[in-house]
Image (cartoon, rainbow, N blue to C red):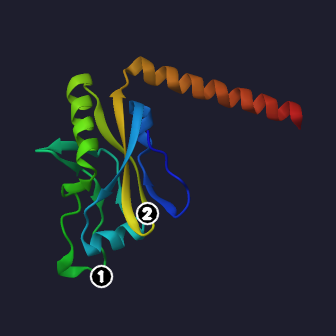
Amino acid sequence: MKTMSNKGTKVIARNRKATHDYHIEETFEAGIVLTGTEIKSIRQGKVNLQDSYARIDRGELFIVGMHISPFEQGNRYNVDPTRTRKLLMRKKEIDKLLGVTKVKGLTLIPLDLHLRNGFAKVQLALGRGKKMYDKRATSAKRDADRMIQRKLKEQNA
């Protein structure tokens, strides 16, 4: 499991729904192939990871459904906002992901999009879909934790 250091990293967009809908098993970081106007839009924060996922096609990794708004000054150089974009990872890592997604039935979900040293990176997670009762249990646990924190805060104050 790779961890992200905070040095030179700026999170642009987060997929908040991912942790609600999936049990996260492992995370990976991948580069992303972009055009000039797309990276300018990303630097302005005009990106949405909602309902996006990654898939492996012929040994290459792609992200599907990620929306990058067209750059305002981009005119004819702008591309389709929801086009499929290629992700950059080592062949060994892609083969590992392919095996895990085929055998265990896991899904590749983007957790966040961030800039590291000027380059756009996507943090991908291997996730197993939650059932409705899992979502309810997670929500109930979060509410209980909030209540406990509130009570502790009242006692200390």
Residue 20 place in picture, x, y as percent:
44, 33
Q: Residues within 10 Å of mark 1 (few under 14, many from 20)?
A: few
Point 45% across, 67% down: residue = 117
Task: List the single residue furthest toward the top.
Answer: 133
| Position above or below: 139 against 41 | above
Q: Secondary structure at mark 1?
A: loop
Q: Quadrant of residue 57?
A: top left
Quadrant where the image shows the C terminus: top right
Name the residue carrying label 2.
115
Q: Mark 2 belongs to which amino acid?
A: Leu
Give percent across and percent down for residue 154. Answer: 84, 33
The answer to which of marks 1 and 2 sits earlier in the sequence is 1
Disc assigned to residue 140: none
Q: Is residue 4 above or below residue 18?
A: below
Relative to 93, is 1 on the left or the right?
right
Q: Which residue is mark 1?
A: 73
Pick whichever, 78 or 9, lies toward us.
9
Q: Residue at x 72, y 26 (%)?
A: 148
Tell which of 144 and 116 is nearer to you: 116
- Pick whichever, 94 or 102, lies toward us: 94
- Residue lying farthest left? 58
Q: Position of residue 127 (x, y in %)?
A: 35, 32
> Viewed as shown, does residue 140 lie left or right of 58?
right
Instruction: List x then y, in percent, for residue 156.
Output: 88, 34
Residue under the point 29% across and 59% down: 32
Residue type beneath disc 1? Gln
Q: CA distance from mark 1 to mark 2?
A: 21 Å
Q: Which of pointers 1 and 2 indicates the residue nearer the eye?
A: 2
- Screen quadrant of the N terminus: top left
Count neighbours of disc 2 (C-alpha within 10 A) and say few if under 14, some if 14 to 19, many if 20 or more.
some
SS class of the residue under badge 2?
Answer: strand
